[in-house]
Image (cartoon, grey):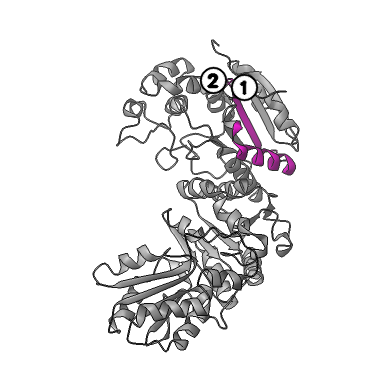
Amino acid sequence: MMQTELPALFARMTGDEKHEWAAASTLDVLWVLYDRVLNVSPKNLADPGRDRFLLSKGHGPMAYYAVLAAKGFLEPSTLDNWTEWDSPLGQHPDRVLVPGVEISSGSLGHGLGLAVGTALGLGVQASPAKVFVLVGDGELDEGSNHEAIAIAGRFGIERLTAVVIDNDSASHGWPGGIDQRFAVEGWATLTVDGRDHDALEAAFTAEHPGQPLAVVAQIRKGN
Amino acid sequence: MRTEFAKTVLAEMDADPRVAVVIAAISRDLFPRVDRVIDVGIREQAMIGVAGGLALTGLRPVVHTYAPFLVERPFEQIKLDLGHQEVGAVLVSVGASYDDPAWGRTHQAPGDVALFDTLPGWTVHVPGHSDEVGPLVRDAIRGDGRVYVRLSMHENAQGYPVGQGVTEVRRGRKGVVLAVGPVLDRVVKAVEQEQADVTVLYASTVRPFDGDGLRAALAEAERSDVMLVEPYLEGTSAHVVTEALEEVPHRLRSVGVKRHLELHAYGTAADHDAAHDLDVVGIAAAVRAFFHR
């Protein structure tokens, strides 16, 4: 399935208009990750060596579900009755219900800690897998993220990449730039246009030896 | 208990490459190895999150720190990063309800077991002696479930077999006293002091609760009167006793750390036991009032 079909998939899920902007903000990042970067597919979900993608910002998962459907993790028809009793798809994803969803999320500020543990666990097992975790700029208000950011930096977890969707949602902003919150803890950082697929791919595949990487994907209203 | 816990974990780490330890600065000296021991610093939310992530990759995390910082501070992480992810871990606390009250209320966690009761699927062990710690921790690590082990600085004079339900310590006819973990010796002294003709049962595992053992003991007694003595929040196990005795008309008296007291006091654990009527004097008074009516 092609990227051009994502809007139609996205549109099959209605009823969460409040988070439509949140979902739309992540669409390009998710597509680039699943289409160009991650070593994960419906065929290797049981492979311990698969890359892990953790959606920490569980709000507005319509884009996530659309990409999973486009990549064959879900039947597109599953999207039509999302949030209903007999649907595996809710307004926050559940890893037990959806193949390919690595963590259940919704309450903000949990994914980074889980991602750090996942990356450390893979390291203990000498796995080649990489770990990508998507957080929002508003989500970074949660203090738990900064515990995880500090640890990942101190431990120099190279296999870990945090993708920060910066859609200007944080109540009080991030003076000095979001990237600085990561850099001061020892992360490599890159800031890119969150709609530019080539720039996103380049950032996600950039070398960052001995450091975790934070990619700030900027999304502004209207783009 | 803490030393026995560390010895057991280190032996299991040697035997099983899945076993990893996650701590938050406290007890670093107990785990003098660099591989698979992750000290996240004083970051308890991350401590549980990291444990959840390790478990997602197939490792068996053992998470350890002081009780309020293990259970209360990162409680949402326990609920979501372990429980809702459907992964296992072994959480082992020290400090109990008020093991060292000179540190004040911030270092006390009498509500820890009650909090675990709000979550499905947790096994809870409350050992009363160091000899019980090794087998309980070893079995917990070798499983794959979610287990909480509550260690204390205060112990009974002897250990009892673990993992076999309740143990009958004393037999009587007028009812049953169920003592959990480190309160057993005080319960036995109080019962003897009051010359109460009651059975005393001992439990070091409270979840799952041995309802069969309680019912069997009551079946041998003339009255279905049950006194529950727990070293944490009073009445924590009252609901499981009630469930176990659903078909048995009974009386229940719960003794434990009082719910209505917000104590602003230091002193010793013995001082706090007295304040909560969890010393021999307080338990004896409860036995007298409940069984000698």
Q: Is residue B19 visible?
A: no
Q: Residues within 10 Å of mark 2 (few under 14, many from 20)?
A: many
Of B185 and A95, the residue lying toward us: B185
User: Which chain is mark 1 on?
Assistant: A
Q: CA distance from mark 1 to mark 2?
A: 10 Å
Q: Residues within 10 Å of mark 1 (few under 14, many from 20)?
A: many
Q: Which residue is mark 2?
A: A28
User: Which chain is mark 2 on?
Assistant: A
Marks 1 and 2 on same chain = yes
From this view, report whether residue B177 is shown above or below residue B29: below
Marks 1/2 in contact by CB < 8 Å: the verdict is yes
**Relative to A186, B172 lies left or right:** left
Of A162 and B59, the residue lying toward us: A162
**Relative to B57, B86 lies left or right:** left
Q: What secondary structure is found at the residue carrying circle 2?
A: helix
Amino acid carrying label 2: it is Asp
Of B76 and B123, the residue lying toward us: B76
- Screen quadrant of the N terminus of chain B: bottom right
Query: Which of disc 2 and disc 1 is earlier in sequence?
Result: 2
Q: Position of residue A118 (x, y in %)?
A: 59, 44
Q: Residue at x 56, y 68 (%)?
A: B137
Is residue B152 rendered magenta in the image?
no
Amino acid carrying label 1: it is Ala
In which quadrant of the rendered view does residue B195 lie?
A: bottom left
Q: Position of residue A157 (x, y in %)?
A: 70, 41
**Dot label at residue B144:** none
Q: Residue at x 57, y 20 (%)?
A: A167
**Dot label at residue A217:** 1
**Magenta region:** A141-168
Is residue A154 rendered magenta in the image?
yes
From this view, report whether residue A117 is shown above or below residue B207: above
**Relative to B113, A208 lies left or right:** right
